[in-house]
Amino acid sequence: MAKTSRKINTQKQAEGKPYAPDEKRAFDLVMQLLAIPGASGDEGAVSRFVVEQLKAAGASDAAITSDAAHRRTVIAGETGNLVLKLPGTQRKARRLLVSHLDTVPVCVGSRPRRKGDFVDSADAATGLGADNRAGVAVILQTALEILRRDLPHPPLTFLWTVQEEVGLQGVRYLKKSMLGGPKLCFNWDGGSPEKLTIGATGGYRMSVVVRGLASHAGGAPEQGVSAITIAALAIADLHQNGWHGDISKGKKHGTSNVGVIHGGRATNVVADEVVLRVEARSHDASFRQRIVREIEKAFQKAARAVTNDSGRRGSAAFEGSLDYESFRLPQDDPSLAAAEKAISRLQGRPLQAIANGGLDANWLCRHGLPTV
């Protein structure tokens, strides 16, 4: 009976009719994935779940590989990027389907529940984690249906990346040779199934260390140089001059954010050190660099402005790196054409979009794999 079912499905596919997936099984799969903890760097459990599902559906050990990207990332992770590679039953170009395994920390402990047509977390203090367990489920279910039902397909590579939420770290250090040279590439990462992201901004992250001079805040505050004061002046300068938040300078546009501040030891001590984490984003690489320079100038200016009673000043030091470069697919990109055709075939309306956040597609494009 199972063989007959596979034969019928294959025949429908050959006739050009859309294949009807098992939606109940797909829903059950995403609910299981949502409940597995897996913040960035801690993707081991969800990676093992994906591997178990693939092997239960008939994937061979040889078809499943992983790399050591987690040994090069900023966070010391549990596991690397996971790949399933299938030879095609059709003579067509190899396709790459990508999704990231990790979720943000607030989603650890998610208890997914269905309420009518919606799913949320039963714990109001915990996020659901649909970014990006929904994407993980989409491409995993695709692989499982192909394996279980012996469906015809082009050569396929499935990629589940790690540490996407902390600066696209997994895909940045991806072992590209595992992928088998795909020609069409698709990245699932939230949003409407009709939305096709054809470009995304580039992001730069930096640490700013402001150093002052400690003194007793009650007995001799004039002898101190407050690192907190320096940081406050710098942030105020950036805000007042339009270099913090949404940034528009003529035809140039970008964003910046001071997102984290740590400093000080006690209320009765003039703070001698503050560490800040800052980001700058823009689709225009040169303007993004300008934003970074303006951030550095603001902190250097503030350090010069704060002195103690003997004229001593503080300092500001910077350390940063490019998280991901921006990309923009041309209108004649083959992956874009294939995606638009697939959506239209399902009576959808393809909608092109540009993202102001980073995606695994940013680094895939840098690796020479244009991805929608």
Image (spheres, grey):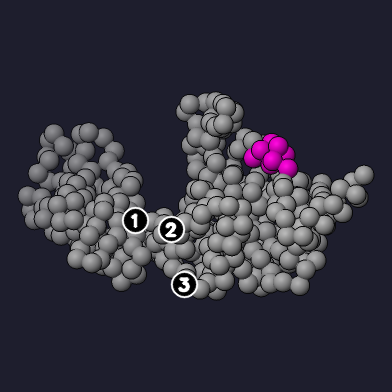
Q: Is residue 158 above or below residue 1?
A: below
Element at badge 3? loop
* The label number, if any, that marks residue 330 in the structure image: 3
Q: What is the chief secondary structure element of the magenta stretch? A: helix
Residue 221 location (% of width, % of height): 12, 40
In front of the other: label 2 or label 1?
A: 2
For the question of whether residue 186 can be seen, the reply is no
Left or right relative to 296: residue 206: right
Give the magenta-colored segment's residue range. Answer: 22-30
Residue type at mark 1? Glu
Residue drawn at x 69%, y 72% as measured from the top left: 93
Element at badge 1? strand
| Cα gap from disc 3 to disc 1, whole angstroms | 28 Å
* The label number, if any, that marks residue 353 in the structure image: 2
Q: Earlier in the sequence, mark 2 or mark 3?
A: 3
In-front residue for pair 338/205: 338
Q: Is residue 48 above or below residue 360?
A: above
Q: Quadrant of the N terminus?
A: top right
Element at badge 2? strand
